[in-house]
Image (cartoon, helix red, strand yellow):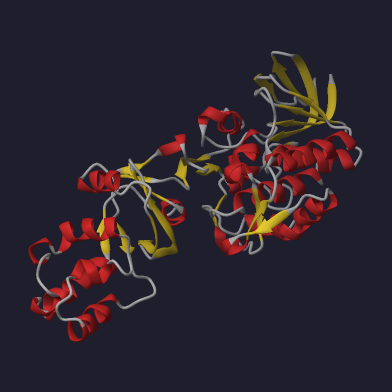
Amino acid sequence: MFYDVIVVGGGASGLLCAITAGQRGRRVLILDSSNKTGKKILMSGGGRCNFTNLYIEPDCFLSNNPHFCKSALSRYTQWDFIALVDKHSIAYEEREHGQLFCKGSAKEILAMLHKECEQAGVTIHTHCAVTSITAPEHNSDKHYILNTNLGKFRTNKLVIATGGLSIPKMGATNFGYNVARQFNIPVIPTRAGLVPFTFSDHIKVLSERLSGISHEVTLATQGKQFRENILFTHRGISGPAALQLSSYWNSGETITVNLFPDEDIGKILRNAKQENPKSLLRNILSRHLSKKLVNECQELIWSESCDKPVAEIADKTLTGIATALSAWCLKPSGTEGYRTAEVTLGGVDTDYFSSQTMESKSQTGLYFIGEVLDVSGHLGGFNFQWAWSSAYVAGLDV
């Protein structure tokens, strides 16, 4: 069974690559080991699919080669995917930071991609596990041969779109990395990204008591910071700010929480001392933070002064309390790992691929696209846009 193009992986990048190639008259086959394609699309954005972002910039992507993503992102932009969504009359809304979500369901995005596949003549086989890949040989078979549980398939153009290791319950495997190694293409060490922090010290117990409480903060590590909400959980700290920072955090590093990103808390305390000298610190701070969080901070920072009126607390002590609240240092024991990670950092080394076509520089006819490559985006639709952009440029070339 010969196809012009075989795409292994029926996720976001695999589907769009197949569509683009099919629209060029190529005979395209998608092979997916799962029972259905697009599972991550369906679960993304709480079932609403944060399909792109209005503010796509190369600086919002992580890679050992930060320039690699630029060409694809410029050739297939967020506006191109939005035009496709508009073509199918899918209603969407803009949320904070330019994030675009379906107003209805993520099912609409997947249905759109399936319809485009059908119109482009793309064949899809699910429940199809690739057991081995044989490279073309100059003197005999000049095709890639894929052995699968559904039989043997041949192609001149092979696209690997199998994603990373994040969320293994959705079928994530190391298949793509193994294919890269088979063809002597290096793999940058991988780790979980966009993932909650966990703690093993007293902060774990604190987080359990505060579970469900959210607060807008500035969260920072090693010169990188994000201004968004954090969410305390039974395991540690989650929420957009924590997820964003996790991609830049390395094991053993501390993170710094500023609970007052918009205000000078030192000034607030000094003013309170002058204007409301009989007030207790916890009552002053409860106007800005949840009472539960204030009580935990009191236990950590000013327990000895908890029942003193602010007038009786020395200015030096107030300055120390303000510093502790605006630069609260925490040391995560780790993250929740691939189980809940939204993306895999690292991956197949982009130095070995054309940034304009996603084709291997050393292996003609072999392409890698999407999350399997060493390109990871920020939270908020950036990883979907990388999937669409890398898929499109490969689809134009295969």
| 64 sits to left or right of 291 | right
Relative to the observer, which residue lies in front, 367 or 382? 382
Residue at figure coordinates x 78%, y 20% from the top left = 153
The percent position of residue 76, horizontal first and vertical second, equals 75, 56
| 146 sits to left or right of 191 | right
The percent position of residue 185, horizontal first and vertical second, equals 58, 37
| 367 sits to left or right of 248 | right
Task: Answer above or below: position of 341 versus 51.
Answer: above
Task: Answer above or below: position of 219 versus 314.
Answer: above
Residue at figure coordinates x 65%, y 37% from the top left = 42
Residue at figure coordinates x 28%, y 59% from the top left = 291
Number of numbered markers? 0
The quadrant of the rendering that contains the C terminus is top right
The percent position of residue 387, horizontal first and vertical second, equals 67, 46
Task: Answer above or below: position of 131 versus 194.
Answer: above
The percent position of residue 325, horizontal first and vertical second, equals 26, 66
Residue that sits furthest to the bottom in the current view: 274
| 353 sits to left or right of 317 | right
